[in-house]
Amino acid sequence: MKIGEIVETMIGMRDKFRWGDISQTEDEAVCAACNILDRLPGMMEEEAAKEALQEFTASYKRMEAALQDAENTLDRLLGAGGQFCDDAITGYHERKKQREAGRETA
C-alpha cells in the first residue's frame, strides 16, 4: 500500500464520520495525520508507510490519554467551582454521551 492510498482511506474515513460521529478532536487528528502523510513521498513502500502510521497511532494514543486526564480533572472539579463550572462540566459529559450514542447507531 502506498502513502496516497493511506491518505485516501483516512480522508474517506473522515468524510464517512463527518456528520456527528467523529469528535472535533478526532477530526483534527485525522487532518493532522493526512497533512503529515502528504509531506511524505507519494511512492513510499508499505513498510515505511506502516512505520509512519505506527507513529501516528502512538501520537493519537498519547492524545487520548491526555484527554482522559483532562476528563478526570473535570470530574474532580465538579462541585468545587460553583454552579457555572458544574453546568459546563455536566454539559461536556452530556455531549460526550451523545457522540458515543451516535457512534453506536452508525
Image (cartoon, rainbow, N blue to C red):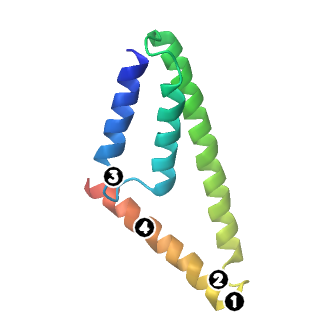
| Disc nearest the viewer among 1 and 3 | 3
Callout 1 environment at 10 Å: few (<14), some (14 to 19), or many (20+)?
A: few
Between 29 and 80, which is closer to the camera in this rendering?
Answer: 29
Q: How many angstroms separate mark 3 from mark 2 (CA)?
A: 29 Å
Work out how far the residue at label 1 is from the one at label 3, CA to CA, in angstroms. 35 Å
Q: Which mark is residue 97?
A: 4
Q: Which residue is mark 1?
A: 82
Q: Nearer the viewer, mark 4 or mark 2?
A: 2
As measured in the structure, the alpha-carbon distance from the residue carrying label 4 to the one carrying label 1 is 23 Å
Cα distance in 3D space between marks 3 and 4: 17 Å
Residue at left 59%, top 27%? 55
Crowding at dot 2, Cα within 10 Å, few <14 / some 14-19 / many 20+, comes out as: some
Please give the name of the residue rendered at 57% of the width and 84% of the height, measured from the top-left corner.
Answer: 87
Q: Residue at x 50, y 77 (%)?
A: 91
Residue picked out by circle 2: 85
Where residue 101 appears, as percent x and y from the top left, is 34, 63
Q: Mark 3 sits on what residue? A: 18
